[in-house]
Image (cartoon, helix red, strand yellow):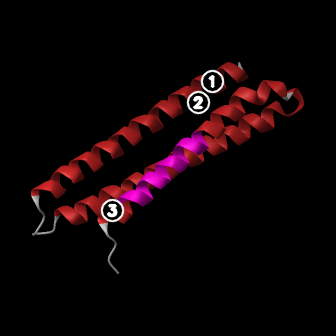
Amino acid sequence: MSIHPQQYKNGYISQMRNLFLLSSIGIALISSSNYFKQYKKVFLLLSIIVIIYSIVYGIFASISSYEYINIIKKEINIIEIDKIVLKNWELWIKLSYIYMVLIAIISIIVFLRKVY
């Protein structure tokens, strides 16, 4: 079975959209936990689970994309424009990793402020 690179990239972009959505929901849950005093611990636990899930989801999506890029790079007939596209794709993956690190840092800071 052969997957066209553009289809794979579209799938990766969709996965990153899901990452952004999930992490936003996680941060919203942390932020809104004060409004539900009775269930604050439940909201904090749910938010941490959602954020961890979103980061792991993003890591797996990025790893599989890197693997696909490496398969394409091994092709003998790769043209120059494809090399440029692959470099750009790798940059998007790196930016996704930066986003995941920032989300983790922000979540830890907000979580610690809520708990202590």
Residue 22 part of the magenta segment: yes
Q: In this orientation, which residue lies closer to the viewer: 11 or 70?
A: 11
Q: Nearer the viewer, residue 97 or 85?
A: 85
The amino acid on which the numbered mark 3 sits, given as a three-letter code, is Gln
Q: Callout 1 environment at 10 Å: few (<14), some (14 to 19), or many (20+)?
A: some
- Disc 2 marks a residue whose amino acid type is Ser
Query: Does dot 3 land on a helix, a strand or a loop?
Result: helix
Callout 2: helix, strand or loop?
A: helix
Foreground: disc 3 or disc 1: 3
Pick the front one: 108 or 9: 9
Disc 2 + disc 1, Cβ < 8 Å? yes
Q: Is residue 62 above or below residue 77?
A: above
Identified at 44% across, 49% down, the residue is 59
What mark, if any, has residue 102 been given in the picture? Answer: none
- Amino acid type, label 1: Val
Camera sees residue 56: no
Question: Mark 2, residues whose alpha carbon is within 10 Å: few (<14), some, or many (≥20)?
Answer: many
Q: Decide whether residue 15 is among the magenta residues.
A: yes
Q: Which mark is residue 110?
A: 1
Decide if residue 4 is on the left or right side of residue 83.
right
Q: Name the residue beneath numbered marker 3.
A: 6
Q: Which residues are magenta?
A: 9-23
- Which secondary structure is most common in the magenta stretch? helix
**Residue at 65% of width from left, 27% of height from top?**
111
Residue labelled with disc 2:
107
